[in-house]
Image: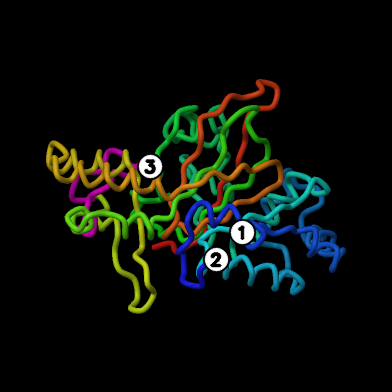
């Protein structure tokens, strides 16, 4: 795999999965008391004890694991998968996701009701935190389209997205990732120019906002000199709806650039088949994600737990 950041092609990434798929059991075998020591800091009589993750003292034995995941996500592949193993319960895996994820920044996970739940449940049934207001495409069986999270929100910057698989679907539902860096490099210059201009995005948590209040930033924008890539922020529906709200329609040349981008994201994508107690960590500034359509076992429907880390404005 190339030493340059985020230069993988789909077949290369798949062939070298041993570099970015990590087994938590290696850490637990080296320090078998980690889970016991961490859970000792949680309230013993609390429902959903994992929600009190902020009371847990950091275990130095986790430092090598965190350093490896951060290096992968921020500087190398843009992704990492952590296999927690069947020995851990779902709540223990939730605790691990929260503790490791917060090493990337503040927990800025947002639920529609704003109930401070530290993870967002992504399932086929209506999320109890949503109360019918904003459910998100994760609750539908259709493909969403490659996107980044938080593209329309102006009060937070999502640096890390992680998804813990509690229960996979019976069929389908694979997570999909795409390398926006290579997608951009493959585009014609005219499309690159359009995609580097500010574009308004609708905020799904506040659809009533007028145009002047919408977040308007480029889909691709340069980061610090020498980094070798551009920060990426995109959602096919949020951006098209924002442009329509601002201009009344999506201009033909802009729509053409969006379609070329979506074709390129598809070309530089691959699937990741998460099973129970596996966590996918994603660099939300570089890697677009999507998922396949799925069909559930009605007795055990698909359930993922989503986490955001980053900066709150």
Figure disc tally = 3
Rendered image quadrant of residue 101: bottom right
Mark toward the start of the polypeptide (2 vs 3) = 2
Judging by the rendered image, the residue that carries numbered circle 3 is 205
Measuring from the top left, give residue 62's x and y in whole percent: 73, 69
Rendered image quadrant of residue 256: top left
Q: Residue at x 51, y 59 (%)?
A: 160
Circle 1 sits in a helix, a strand or a loop, which is it? loop
Q: Is residue 99 magenta?
A: no
The front one of 298 and 38 is: 298
Measuring from the top left, give residue 295's x and y in whole percent: 58, 24
Secondary structure mainly formed by the magenta segment: loop
Q: Residue at x 87, y 63 (%)?
A: 32
Label 1 Cα crowd, 10 Å radius (few <14 / some 14-19 / many 20+): few
**What distance separates the C-alpha of mark 1 from that of mark 2?**
7 Å
Question: Left or right: where does residue 73 sit relative to residue 35?
Answer: left
Residue 268 against residue 297 in the figure, above or below: below
Judging by the rendered image, the residue that carries numbered circle 2 is 1
Question: Left or right: where does residue 164 sit relative to residue 146?
Answer: right
Residue 284 against residue 243 in the figure, above or below: below
Assign the C terminus to one quadrant of the image: bottom left
Measuring from the top left, give residue 293's x and y in whole percent: 51, 30
Judging by the rendered image, the residue that carries numbered circle 1 is 16
* Cβ atoms under marks 1 and 3 closer than 8 Å: no
Circle 2 sits in a helix, a strand or a loop, which is it? loop
Q: Which mark is residue 76?
A: none
Please report the bounds of the magenta region as a residue range.
195-213
Q: Nearer the viewer, mark 2 or mark 3?
A: 2
The front one of 171 and 304 is: 171
* Cβ atoms under marks 1 and 2 closer than 8 Å: yes
């Amino acid at each position: 795999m190339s030493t340059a950041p985020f230069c993988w092609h789909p077949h290369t990434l798949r062939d070298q999965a041993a570099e970015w798929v990590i087994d938590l059991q290696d850490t637990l075998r080296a320090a078998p008391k980690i889970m016991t020591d961490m859970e000792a800091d949680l309230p013993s009589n609390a429902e959903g004890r994992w929600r009190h993750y902020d009371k847990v003292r950091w275990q130095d034995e986790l430092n090598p694991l965190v350093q490896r995941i951060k290096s992968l996500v921020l500087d190398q592949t843009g992704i990492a998968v952590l296999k927690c193993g069947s020995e851990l319960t779902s709540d223990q895996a939730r605790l691990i996701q929260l503790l490791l994820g917060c090493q990337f920044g503040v927990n800025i996970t947002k639920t529609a009701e704003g109930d401070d739940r530290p993870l967002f449940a992504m399932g086929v049934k209506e999320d109890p935190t949503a109360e019918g207001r904003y459910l998100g495409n994760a609750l539908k069986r259709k493909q969403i389209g490659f996107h980044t999270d938080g593209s329309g929100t102006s009060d937070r910057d999502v640096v890390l997205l992680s998804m813990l698989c509690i229960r996979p679907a019976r069929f389908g539902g694979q997570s999909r990732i795409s390398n926006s860096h290579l997608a951009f490099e493959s585009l014609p210059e005219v499309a690159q120019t359009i995609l580097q201009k500010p574009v308004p995005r609708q905020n799904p948590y506040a659809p009533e906002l007028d145009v002047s209040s919408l977040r308007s930033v480029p889909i691709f924008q340069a980061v610090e000199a020498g980094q070798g890539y551009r920060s990426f922020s995109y959602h096919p529906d949020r951006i098209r709806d924002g442009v329509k709200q601002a201009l009344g329609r999506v201009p033909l040349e802009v729509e053409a650039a969006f379609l070329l981008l979506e074709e390129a994201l598809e070309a530089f994508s691959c699937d990741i088949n998460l099973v129970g107690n596996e966590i996918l960590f994603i660099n939300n500034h570089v890697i677009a994600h999507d998922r396949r359509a799925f069909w559930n076992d009605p007795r055990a429907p698909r359930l993922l737990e989503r986490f955001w880390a980053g900066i709150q404005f």
